[in-house]
Image (cartoon, rainbow, N blue to C red):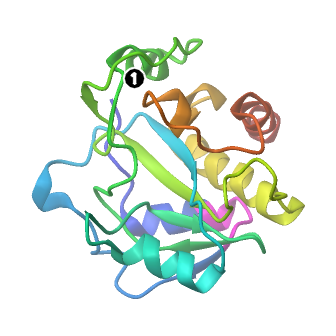
Amino acid sequence: MAPPMSAGAFLDALRDEGVRVVEVGDWREHNRNHKGPWGPVHGVMIHHTATADAERTVRLCRDGRPDLPGPLCHGVVTKDGTVHLVGHGRANHAGLGDDDVLRAVIAEKTLPLDREANTDGNRHFYGFECENLGDGEEPWPQAQLEAIVKAAAAVCRRHGWSERSVIGHAEWQPGKVDPRGFSTAWLRDRVRDRLK
């Protein structure tokens, strides 16, 4: 069981891993904590935004939509490899997912198929939204992929987690497909190599 990092520790962990970070507004206090607790945290969840244009994407992830208030993640990874911090605390990114998947993440075991949506993931995961249309066609620039690996590794390193604590939204919630365009198995391999 791990309490979430403080905002300062989160920022330091990213910078220590070599991530280029931009702090957006009042990100340290911007959260959905009034809707429920954040923590204990058990992993890092990766998403694609299904949007284009970095500025608009960061604004959307910070402010949310009429049907889904922001923040929609903790950090937005734009195509140039910058991580824009938009929230700290509970964020609307994971939604309900499979309790068997959560148990596997906690135990750092192979993930089962996500068959249910019965567990609050917003409480238990750090979330990174990654700027991409998510159509399986749009390329992922190398700088962006490197930043995703570094950001996930930074959180894992700070908490003492292995690469098995990194999952995609598609592995958590039935019907989700993100991130599309690279495999989370590839991502976990890269995080594992970086943590060495």
| Amino acid under disc 1 | Leu
Quadrant location, the N terminus:
top left
Q: Is residue 119 visible?
A: yes
- Compared across the picture, whether 173 is left or right of 22 comes to left
Q: Residues within 10 Å of mark 1 (few under 14, many from 20)?
A: many
Question: Looking at the image, which is closer to me, 31 or 39?
Answer: 31
Residue name at image x 13 percent, y 55 percent: 35
Q: Quadrant of residue 28?
A: bottom left
Residue at the disc numbered 1 = 102
Question: Looking at the image, which is closer to me, 184 or 105?
Answer: 184
Residue 134 vertical placement versus 185 (above, below): below
Q: Quadrant of residue 124?
A: top left
Residue name at image x 32 percent, y 69 percent: 70
Q: Which residues are magenta?
A: 14-20
SS at mark 1? helix
Question: Looking at the image, which is closer to me, 128 or 191?
Answer: 128
Residue name at image x 86 percent, y 63 percent: 141
- Compared across the picture, whether 99 is left or right of 36 comes to right
